[in-house]
Image: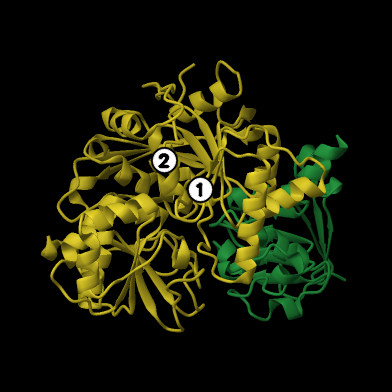
Chain colours: A yellow, B green
């Protein structure tokens, strides 16, 4: 029976020859991602229920990121609980402050993500890892507890939607613009319960970093997972980043696999996009919305806080003064160091940016750049819900790092293409 | 008698149900104080034990934070009736022993303040104020069993 890549991975993980959409499977979990907000409650639940164990101390990756370095006493307590547990259980991969980073940038960078595997994490953007031809999805704390203790979880095999990304990206248009366009087309629940599989020529020239921006936002269309097939770029990245376990199994969709929907996007015709408050599906072309006043720019997060995002922003900002306060958040310590080594910090400093330590920070309204009533932020993050980055009457506009940098220069929504 | 609180809106997300600025704790009593705060700052005062939230499509979209379900449980909300639910939230509800009821056209069948009674296993909602009985598709048996046991971990322990 022909299968999609998502179906093949779930079949393999549950010891079946084939599976079809709608079927419930009990799957083995290969990697569990744990962070500081959703894992401490899971740990407490396990203790309370007398099942205080981990199924495999080598398959759990822990990094505080949401409120790190601790923003207040309560978050320090969360970190303390996470720290005590990671040590008590002898977890092999525990990234402490100094090596901790935004989870979805850190895990691939540190070689924890392999094709063909089933990865879960207590965070909705766990779907990011699908860029590596893996099945990856976000779960809540109870499921996280069950996965930590047993190494297994049940899943409903999702139907798949195929997104064919034709053509190639024009100058000034990035993978962020592609995924904002895809979400604009299908809406924030357009892929509810479904797998979003991305194929097409536009992916060929995209780095793994750029691809992760696409799969990262699958959840913003309601998707269960986002997934991209394995190719040369995947191999090249993995050759460089995989450390302990270098073996993996590559699955790919059969040519005659079934999809509930196919959506074609001509990437050659795309323009820089901005998603207006308060939904990621409110995308507009920059040409239709340039000139709206902004008060803050935020360049970072699991969506766009990787090194190439920093390079694009620096290239646009270089030699210019910024009109609004601008916060740069390299997503991991390694990216932070790369920025420093490549001289990007000097560019950011000269322009008047503040450079933060790796953290999820203000993306989710935690700290390090919270908005006041009535303020607007151009942000490279993934959500622009009511109150997402601060006051319920503040506004978040989602865009690529290039568009955020151009808007920081002008203090209004601005087209990055004139600076490239 | 439990009452309905109707929000005629789609995509009510977990940031509205419990804003991230309060996620520095997993204490249910603390979380409950801020339940639905960014959507309706007066909700906690209005909500009485056993009340029900009624909403449009895609309820609970966004972050995977189970804190959203805990905040609702802490505020003594008995169930959410929505046209549809976001995937992770739906799963979290069952895992926590909380009823998500899917009902097409949900926001148009109730008015805020309607007195209602729900039979979860038969899939019936009695709207006493309007004098109507509404049928919904009950959750599958295994999900009802988990909810009755008080959540997934209790259920695992018992079975």
Residue shown at 51% from the left, 77% from the top = A392
Residue A209's disc is: none
Horizontal side of residue A99 vs A27, given as left or right: left
On the image, which quarter does residue A384 sit in?
bottom left
Residue that label 2 marks: A110
| Mark 1 closeness class: few <14, some 14–19, many ≥20 residues within 10 Å | some
Q: Position of residue A236 (x, y in %)?
A: 28, 31
Apparent side of residue A189 relative to residue A44 in the rendered image (left or right): left
Of residues B109 and A184, the one drawn nearer to the viewer in this rendering: A184
Residue A24 in view of the camera: no
Q: What residue does disc 1 label? A: A95
The image shows residue A118 at horizontal and vertical percentages of 53, 32
Name the one closer to the observer, B75 or A18: B75
Q: In the displayed structure, does residue B47 sit left or right of residue A26?
A: right
Q: Residue at x 67, y 40 (%)?
A: A89
Q: Position of residue A252 (x, y in %)?
A: 39, 24
The chain letter under disc 1 is: A
* Residues at circles 1 and 2 in contact by the CB criterion of under 8 Å: yes
- Dot 1 or dot 2, earlier in sequence: 1
In which chain is the residue bearing label 2? Answer: A
Quadrant location, the C terminus of chain A: bottom left
Up-down: is B16 above or below A203? below
Taking A312 as reference, is A243 above or below it?
above
Q: Gap in Å between the C-alphas at discs 1 and 2?
A: 10 Å
């Amino acid at each position: 029976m022909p299968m999609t890549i998502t179906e093949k991975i779930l079949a393999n993980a549950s010891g079946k020859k084939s599976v079809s959409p709608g079927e419930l499977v009990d799957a083995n979990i290969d990697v569990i991602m744990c962070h500081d907000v959703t894992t401490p409650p899971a740990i407490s639940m396990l203790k309370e229920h007398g099942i205080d164990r981990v199924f495999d101390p080598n398959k759990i990756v822990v990094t505080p990121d949401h409120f790190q370095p601790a923003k207040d006493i309560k978050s320090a307590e969360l970190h303390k609980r996470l720290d005590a547990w990671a040590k008590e259980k002898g977890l092999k991969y525990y990234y402490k402050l100094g090596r901790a980073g935004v989870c979805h940038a850190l895990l691939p960078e540190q070689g924890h993500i392999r094709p063909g595997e089933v990865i879960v994490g207590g965070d909705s953007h766990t779907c990011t890892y699908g860029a590596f031809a893996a099945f990856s999805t976000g779960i809540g704390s109870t499921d996280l507890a069950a996965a930590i203790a047993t190494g297994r979880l049940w899943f409903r095999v999702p139907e798949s939607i195929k997104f064919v990304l034709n053509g190639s990206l024009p100058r000034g248009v990035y993978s962020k613009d592609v995924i904002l366009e895809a979400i604009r087309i299908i809406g924030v629940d357009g892929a509810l319960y479904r797998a979003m599989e991305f194929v097409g020529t536009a992916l060929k020239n995209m780095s793994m970093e750029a691809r992760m921006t696409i799969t990262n936002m699958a959840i913003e269309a309601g998707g269960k997972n986002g997934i991209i097939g394995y190719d040369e770029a995947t191999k090249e990245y993995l050759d460089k980043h995989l450390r302990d376990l270098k073996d993996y199994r590559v699955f790919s969709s059969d040519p005659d696999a079934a999809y509930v929907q196919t959506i074609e996007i001509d990437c050659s015709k795309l323009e820089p996009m901005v998603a207006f408050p308060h939904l990621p599906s409110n995308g507009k072309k920059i040409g239709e919305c340039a000139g709206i006043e902004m008060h803050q720019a935020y360049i970072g997060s699991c969506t766009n806080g990787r090194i190439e995002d920093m390079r694009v922003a620096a290239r646009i900002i270089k030699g210019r003064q910024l009109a609004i306060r601008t916060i740069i958040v390299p997503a991991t310590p390694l990216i932070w160091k790369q920025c420093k080594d490549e001289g990007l910090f000097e560019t950011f400093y000269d322009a008047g940016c503040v450079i933060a330590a790796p953290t999820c920070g203000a993306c989710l309204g935690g700290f390090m750049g919270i908005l006041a009533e009535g303020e607007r932020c151009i942000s490279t993050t993934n959500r622009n819900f009511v109150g997402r980055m601060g006051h319920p009457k503040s506004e978040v506009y989602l865009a690529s790092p290039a568009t955020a940098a151009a808007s920081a220069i002008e203090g209004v929504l601005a087209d990055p293409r004139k600076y490239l | 008698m439990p009452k309905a609180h109707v929000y005629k809106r789609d995509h009510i997300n977990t940031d509205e149900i419990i804003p991230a600025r309060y996620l520095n704790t997993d204490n249910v009593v603390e979380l409950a104080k801020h339940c639905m705060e960014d959507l309706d700052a007066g909700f906690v005062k209005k909500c009485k034990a056993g009340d029900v939230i009624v909403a449009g499509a895609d309820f609970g979209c966004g972050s995977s934070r189970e804190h959203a379900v805990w905040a609702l449980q802490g505020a003594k909300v008995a169930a959410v009736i929505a046209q549809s639910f976001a995937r992770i939230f739906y799963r979290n509800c069952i895992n926590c022993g909380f009823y998500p009821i899917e009902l097409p056209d949900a926001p148009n069948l109730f008015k805020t303040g309607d007195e209602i009674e729900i039979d979860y296993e038969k899939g019936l909602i009695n709207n006493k104020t309007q004098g109507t009985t509404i049928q919904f598709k009950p959750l599958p048996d295994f999900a009802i069993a988990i909810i009755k046991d008080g959540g997934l971990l209790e259920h695992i322990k018992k079975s």
